[in-house]
Image (cartoon, grey):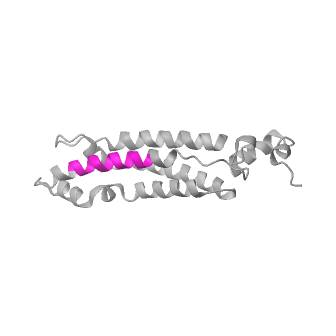
Amino acid sequence: MAEDPDATASQLSPAQTQFLKDFLGYGGAASGADGYAAPSAALMPVWRDARDSVGEQINALENVLRGSALPLFEGIAEKGLNGVTSGQLTAMQVALIELDKATGPARAAAIKKTGQAVSEMRGFLSSNDVLPLLDENPMGVSVSIRSTLASALDKIESGLVTVREV
C-alpha cells in the first residue's frame, strides 16, 4: 500500500515543509493529486485579455499613425505591437502556457519561470522609451499599454502566490 503523502508531510519539520512548498510546489492536502500545486486556470485568460485590449488600442493608434507625416509614427505603425514590445508579450504568454501544462516537479520550475517573466515584463514596462509616447500620444487615441499590462501582471503575480501557497 502506498504511503499517504499528507501523512508523511505531517512528520516533517516546518523548515522541511517550507522547502517543499517553496522549491517543489508541494502544498499538502490542498495540492493536486500528484502532491504539487494544482494548475491555476485563471492566469492565462488574464494575460490574453490584457494583450487583446492592448492590441486593439495599438491597432486604433496605428490607423491614425499611418496617416502621419512623422517617420517615427509611421515606423511604429508598420512594426505594430510586436515591434514595440520586442517579444516580451510572447515570452510572458509562453511562460503561462508552460505553467498551465506543467505537472509534478516541472510545476515548480514553471512557477519560477513565470515569476521571472513577470519581473522581466515589469522591467520592460518601466524602462521602454516608446511606451510612454504611445500611452500619451498626441493623436487623440486612448492608449493605456503600461497600466493595462501592469494590472494583468498584478493579477498573475497574485495567482502565482496562490499557486505557491496551495
With 154 as the anchor, is 112 left or right in this view?
Answer: right
Please indicate whether residue 152 sits to the left or right of residue 99 in the image. left
Left or right of 103? Residue 48 is: left
Residue 58 within the segment the image draws in magenta: yes
Q: In which quarter of the image is residue 80?
A: bottom left
The quarter of the picture where the N terminus appears is: bottom right
Q: Position of residue 118 (x, y in %)?
A: 49, 48
Q: Is residue 150 magenta?
A: no
What x and y, as percent, mark residue 22? 69, 46
Q: In which quarter of the image is the C terminus?
A: top right
**Magenta-drawn stretch, dominant element (helix, strand or loop):** helix
Front-most of residues 84 and 56: 56
Measured as percent of width and height from the top left, residue 86 is found at 37, 59
Q: Where is residue 89 in the image (x, y as percent from the top left)?
A: 41, 54
The residue lying at 70 percent from left, 50 percent from top is: 36
Give the left or right position of residue 103, taking residue 67 as reference. right
Would you identify the image quadrant in which residue 29 lies? top right
Q: Which residue is drawn at 46% across and 58% down?
A: 91
Question: Which residues, given as a range, are shown in magenta?
Answer: 47-61
Q: Which residue is drawn at 85% across and 46% down?
A: 8
